[in-house]
Image: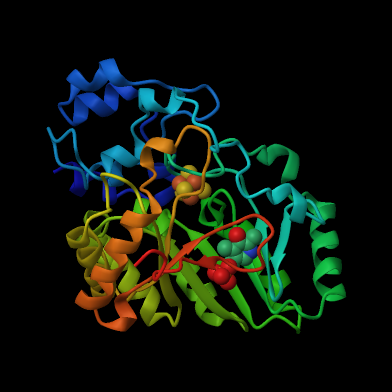
Amino acid sequence: MINHLITQKNWQTQLSEAITSVDELLSILELESLKARIYLPAYFELRVPRAFVAKMTIGDSDDPLLKQVLPDQQEQITVTGYVNDPLDENAHNPVKGLLHKYQSRVLLTITGACAIHCRYCFRQHFDYSANMPTASAQADIIDYITAHPEINEVILSGGDPLNVTNRRLFAWFDTLDAIPQLTTIRLHTRLPVVIPARLDDALLDRMAQSRCHIVMVIHCNHANEIDTLTLEYLQRARVAGITLLNQTVLLKGINDSVASQVALSQRLFAAGVLPYYLHILDKVAGAAHFDSDERSAIELYWRLLSELPGYLVPKLVRELPNRPFKVPIDIYNGV
Ligand SMILES: *Cc1c(COP(=O)(O)O)cnc(C)c1O
Ligand code: SF4
């Protein structure tokens, strides 16, 4: 029932009506008893849109979607090796708002805001306000790209790039479409999963008209995140000619079972999305309790290789500072 009421609203309304109160969230889910184990850091508050909450199961404290967003006391635990900037991104930041770490593509953080706050996020300590492209930085970004002819792809990221208005987003598309060396514009976004209505007609039309190929890499961790409505919107994006891929973070107790990963790949495929990356968690402070050890990840991966067709097996990778690509995990290690 909640589902029906919420998803009728336009995406901006859904965005502004996201739940930010622990009490309200637990009351909707009839899980008031969990209050005792909540810890809420001031730098990363609770945020979860109602359309995402509607995919959770009432009364289930182990719900795999709830566990991704519910602040937990374990975030306070300091664990050696888990740091604020695990990828040392500051080292690859030649222009405000632009990361150039991999040869042929650059990543632009066009907003610091996200529709949802994922507790395992590696950017939860990131100072976006100090690294947002201003109007003048936009010119610097264009200059940087033109001065580096090896760049052929721009990744719009954040935060969540679909968190900005169509007007601002289309201005970026216009700017990038006008740079001849670019062949591809990519978006890294969780919004199609969190507020599916974000994929509105105007956005799909504009992307369909782009000179560049449009690749949308969504971020979905569990099959339950793709309900019927989400599936329909994703299928429409595919009809609009957008290449759809998914990245997942391997999360202990949430999606680290064979059954969960197989169901996710199959559900993604039903929605027209191919699995791209399965990330080993970045070692960010406050998220150690989500990390599954590499040996278990490798064991899980062997099972996925045997149970799924090759095109539904994501690449198992870890991101490391100062490596020119996401590093494939050596699945023969210790076998
Ligand atoms: C992940 C990432 C990319 C894209 O890498 P692909 O392997 O092409 O998906 C580009 N730049 C940065 C900084 C990244 O973190
Ligand atoms: S949507 Fe992505 S960037 Fe935003 S909080 Fe979640 S993991 Fe972090």
Does 189 appear above or below 150? above
Does 174 appear above or below 11? below
Q: Hey, which residue is sitting farthest top in the picture? A: 36
Which residue occupies 38% across, 26% down? Answer: 74
Would residue 322 be visible to someone looking at this image? yes
Does 41 appear above or below 296? above
Which residue occupies 67% across, 68% down? Answer: 324
Which residue occupies 22% across, 77% down? Answer: 306
Measuring from the top left, give residue 259's x and y in whole percent. Answer: 17, 61
The image quarter in which residue 308 lies: bottom left
- The quadrant of the image that shows the N terminus is top left
- The quadrant of the image that shows the C terminus is bottom left
Measuring from the top left, give residue 249's x and y in whole percent. Answer: 40, 54
Nearer-the-camera pick, 269 or 194: 269
Image side of residue 262 versus residue 220, left or right: left
Does 52 appear above or below 246? above
The image quarter in which residue 313 lies: bottom left
Would residue 156 be visible to someone looking at this image? no
Measuring from the top left, give residue 225's x and y in whole percent. Answer: 27, 55
